Image (cartoon, rainbow, N blue to C red):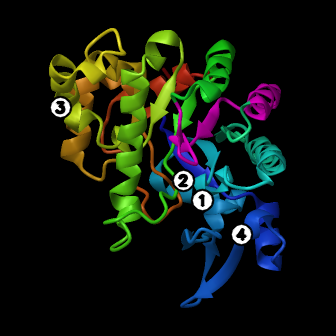
Amino acid sequence: MRTIDVHAHVFPPALVTAARAGDAPDGIRTERVDGAEWVVHRQGYRYPLSASFHDVEARLADMDALGIDLAVLSPAPPLFLYWSDEGVDAARAVNDAVAGMVAQAPERFAGLATLPMSDPGAAVAELRRCATLGLRGAQIGPHVEGTPLDDAALRPVLAAAQELRLPLTIHPYYVGSTPGLDDYYLTNLQGNPWQTALCASRLIFSGTLDALPELDLVLVHGGGHLPYQIGRLDHGRRVRPETQGCREQPSAYLRRFHYDTLTHSSAATGWLIDLVGADRVMYGTDMPFDMGGGPLEVAHPDIAHRNAERLYALKEDPDE
């Protein structure tokens, strides 16, 4: 059975070279930690830079080891650079690099863009340009340096994605110094799923999903905390006057989103599938981050490849 990984990250080769030379945008650099190379971002985010991030042959070998036939590549989220004056130019360069990596193995890769969301007009223009490059959608943060995605200023970007029929993957990025999250890597372990749930909840309660009924949104990490606390949101809408901005109960919007399988718990993934349906869940690994997952554990063709084929307009499995 064909397997498509919809949650797979890259760090463009030219950017790796620039980071090693101390000439990368926003001060991105590399350093050695116990003999291994790490990427270090100005705001403090750091992670091992495996060859699979930037070397196509290394990535293909890692995919083969996990039985992955095709990966939907997206830039590493710290490359959003929403906080940087270099964001527009950097997004364009990163997207060209992603398209170039896809072109090296078009039967094994598809690509997602990054958008300079701090400039919504430029983000719309870049999304349209990336459609001409053959990229299959875009990956954006759950907020833009504190501005939530349901803010009116960002609506043109969401509307353009709906118009172009290009899915948007909502991916958390470094949450910064937050009380309680500074220790134990909780900025990622709890901060990431919290950001996703907060973003999705706002899109629901604000009426954004009602206003954009054809917009496709992908929530990584199994939808964060959202699916597992949806009953609380439903109860809140029944009893709180602040929650009346959406037309239906929050649980009615769960199937407006697509989800990946990356929960690190077969029980949690199984519950997610039961809740939203197998037709809304896709295999995702978060490769090659150290917080990534392993081989697909659910032998379901929709989750393995069909949902991704439909969502990203990919060539269907010729063996089915």
User: Which label is found at residue 232?
Assistant: 3
Work out how far the residue at label 4 is from the one at label 3, CA to CA, in angstroms. 40 Å
* Contact between labelled residues 2 and 1, with CB atoms less than 8 Å apart: yes
Dot 4: within a 10 Å radius of its alpha carbon, few (fewer than 14), some, or many (20 or more) residues? many
Work out how far the residue at label 4 is from the one at label 2, CA to CA, in angstroms. 30 Å
4 or 1: mark nearer the eye: 4
Sequence-wise, which precedes: disc 4 or disc 3? 4
Mark 1 lies on a secondary structure that is helix
The type of residue carrying mark 4 is: Ile
Q: Nearer the viewer, residue 69 or 291?
A: 291
* Contact between labelled residues 1 and 4, with CB atoms less than 8 Å apart: no
Image quadrant of residue 243? top left
The residue to which callout 4 is attached is 28
4 or 2: mark nearer the eye: 4
Work out how far the residue at label 4 is from the one at label 1, CA to CA, in angstroms. 27 Å
The residue to which callout 1 is attached is 61
Q: Position of residue 168 (x, y in %)?
A: 57, 30
Q: Position of residue 294 (x, y in %)?
A: 39, 55
Dot 3: within a 10 Å radius of its alpha carbon, few (fewer than 14), some, or many (20 or more) residues? few
The residue lying at 29 percent from left, 23 percent from top is 242
The residue lying at 33 percent from left, 73 percent from top is 184
Work out how far the residue at label 1 is from the one at label 2, CA to CA, in angstroms. 5 Å
Does the magenta run of residues contain 127?
Answer: yes
The type of residue carrying mark 1 is: Ala
The residue range painted magenta reads 121-149
Give the answer, above or below, for where 187 lies relative to 273: below
